[in-house]
Amino acid sequence: MNVLICDPISPKGIELFRSRPEFNVTVLDKRLSEAELLPLVKDVEAMVVRSETKVTKKVIDAAPKLRVVGRAGVGIDNVDVEAATQRGVVVMNTPGGNTVTTAELAFFLLGALARHIGPAYASMAAGKWDRKALQGTEIHGKTLGVLGMGRIGSEVAKRALAFGMRVVAYDPFLTEARAKQLGVELVQDVDGIYRSSDFITVHMPVTEQTRGMLNAEAFTKMKPGVRIINAARGEIIDEKDLLTALESKKVGGAALDVFSEEPLPADHPFRKLPNVLLTPHLGASTSEAQVKCGIEVAEIIAAYLLTGEVRNAVNLPFIDAKTYEQVQPYLNLGEKLGKLLSQIAPANIERVHVTYGGNAKNLPNVDPVTRSILLGLLHAGAIKDVNNVNVRAAAAAHGITVEEKRSDEPVTFNEWLHVAVFAPNGEKVSAGGTFFGSPNNPRIVRIFSQPTEIVPSGVVFLMNNKDRPGIVGHLGTLMAKYKVNIASMNLSREVVGGQALTVLNLDSVPPQPLMDEISRDPDISNVRVLKL
């Protein structure tokens, strides 16, 4: 079996491959472009990459024998997972190998900012002895704001606490109980981090919600002279806005290990600012992390190729083919229910309760479905690198209890999947789904304990309204005014003239002026747009 190692990994990992006579191992001595890779992958069954090599759809299509792609590290931004899944190629990563290494770098960058280590070295290298200009600040007693309390964020918090810092944390999925266990103060919204922090460190994935979240608006809410550390993903910071904030001294300094474009262009303005400390994406670059990741990626790929064992797969739950065929329709429905709830539920969830009713209670294994629900629920938040394999661990790490129940209670539908999420204050939000006609036709049929019918795809508009004559015409007129087409509509009410729930499937996202105009109606409330 041919194994192609595209990026440098630990020699111990390479040796592990070569110690097995079943493998023919090729190690590339430099990073290759997509065009250069194509002729090399035609007979390859396994590819090993780090962050440099791009495993694109073209590369996957050019490798008809490819069975597995192993990422020596966590992030899989450089692998087209969807294309791999469509081709039946398993994508695996090594999520535990670089946690401590990245956390240490982030904390060292924090200290270097506080004491001007970078400018001090440059000054000394230039033959100067300028102590006065390099007066720093103690970190003891200062407040560190942590955006994202997954594995790495939690490790950074531990180190900050050991140095006498006050740590405040924002993470939509971190419960108060888990925060207390970690010794950090949990804030309910990101503005709480901005207002109180002397230093802010970023440990979130790039999602629709986090992309560009540290922008001009965010910087205006921060303390004057705040210092920013980013060893997560460059796209989380709006670099132009950060540049402006640094030049105005609103942001006192920034230490950046990641950038929206890598390598960082030679003429990038960041390189010229004295209050910016730059490192070339060194988060996982320690000998210990490379050894761990190299050995782990070799072990998981060898196990898969030789025995079929699946570990750390980001696109394949561990279930047999027969069971997968039975649960497959519920996986999509479950993820859609999770995504819907992630957009209407309270920020801090502490419990998820899943009920399997009707024929669903007879599924041989409900675990993959529960995982799909959690995946939808957590992907929309700020939990980093969540996948089908680690989603339960990610939920547990954030203090979320998961409960499953096979119910014998009579239900209206032949198949019934119901998900309820609970906040620490007891607030509950729930949704239920089923199939109409066939498993390929899922529907969400209950929200907030009210009946409805939602096609779980695309743009969904929700609102509560008083049940009055003309509300449908009024809504349709407004939608037409802003050229937003309604694909389907469902209305439900508790009593005549009482409160109603209106749900629309739309062909496009309604513009904010339309949302504002709808919200001005005194009989309309809780106007929301969801993306499913």
Image (cartoon, grey):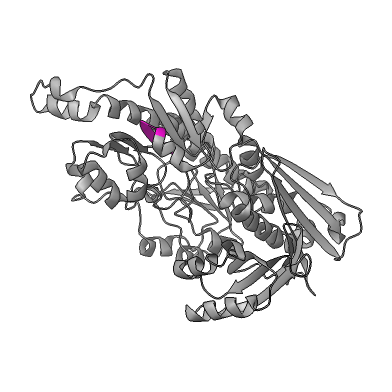
Q: How many marks?
A: 0
Tell me which segment is drawn in magenta.
Answer: 196-202
Residue pictured at 40% horizontal, 43% vertical: 8
**Residue 259 in picture, x, y percent from top left:** 33, 48
Q: Is residue 152 above or below residue 182?
A: below
**Residue 269 in picture, x, y percent from top left:** 20, 48
- Horizontal side of 464 relative to 51 (left or right) equals right
Location of the C terminus by quadrant is: bottom right
Answer yes or no: is residue 263 visible.
Answer: no
**Residue 429 in picture, x, y percent from top left:** 70, 51
**Residue 320 in picture, x, y percent from top left:** 76, 54
Q: Is residue 171 magenta?
A: no
Residue pictured at 61% horizontal, 52% vertical: 342
Q: Nearer the viewer, residue 211 or 23?
A: 211
Q: Is residue 361 above or below residue 133?
A: below
Answer yes or no: is residue 499 visible.
Answer: yes
Residue pictured at 55% horizontal, 56% vertical: 45
- Horizontal side of 400 relative to 381 (left or right) equals right
Q: Is residue 110 above or below residue 353?
A: above
- Horizontal side of 64 relative to 216 (left or right) equals right
Q: Is residue 351 above or below residue 479?
A: above
Q: Nearer the viewer, residue 120 or 506?
A: 506
Q: Nearer the viewer, residue 112 or 295?
A: 112
Q: Residue furthest left?
A: 127
Residue pictured at 21% horizontal, 50% vertical: 268
